[in-house]
């Protein structure tokens, strides 16, 4: 029982480390894509995405790949939180 729990903990820690390294590598690329007004997942220009304005005036752009973005200004976007979609 104790050994089982220990093994699970180690595997979880390794998984988190790998994810952290992956994020370190991928984050600058995603930030660059977003600064170009492109989707971080598929590179599609977000101007071509499906956009709709919410009741609070926030403009949400949904890419064809399903990722959601908040349009801040012309050609300026940020990733939308799940609660904002
Ligand atoms: Zn996309």
Image (spheres, rainbow, N blue to C red):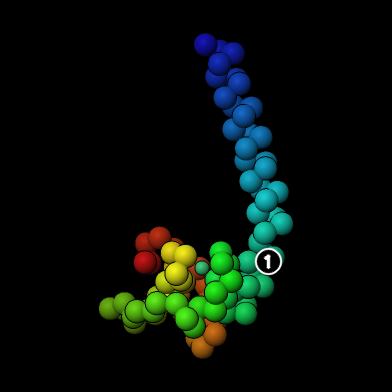
Snapshot quadrant of residue 52: bottom left
Image quadrant containing the C terminus:
bottom left
Mark 1 lies on residue: 29
Residue 1: x, y in percent? 52, 11
Residue 27 is situated, as x and y percent measured from the top left of the image, at: 66, 61
Could you say which is closer to the camera, residue 64 or residue 4? 64
Residue drawn 63% across and 46% down? 19
Image-based side of 49 in relation to 75, left or right: left
Q: Residues within 10 Å of mark 1 (few under 14, many from 20)?
A: few
Extreme-bottom residue of the structure: 74
Total numbered labels placed on residues in the image: 1
Q: Position of residue 30 (x, y in %)?
A: 63, 66
Indicate whether 69 appears above or below 27.
below
Q: Is residue 80 visible?
A: no
Res 31 → quadrant: bottom right
**Farthest left residue in view:** 55
Identify the residue shown where x is 60% and y is 20%.
6
Q: Is residue 81 above or below residue 56?
A: above
């Amino acid at each position: 029982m104790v050994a089982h729990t220990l093994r699970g903990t180690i595997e979880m820690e390794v998984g988190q480390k790998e994810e952290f390294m992956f994020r370190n590598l991928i984050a600058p690329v995603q930030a660059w894509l977003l600064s170009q007004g492109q989707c971080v997942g598929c590179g599609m220009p977000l101007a071509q995405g499906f956009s709709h304005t919410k009741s609070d005036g926030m403009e949400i752009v949904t890419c064809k790949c399903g990722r959601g973005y908040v349009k801040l200004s012309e050609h300026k976007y940020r990733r939308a939180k799940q609660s904002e979609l």
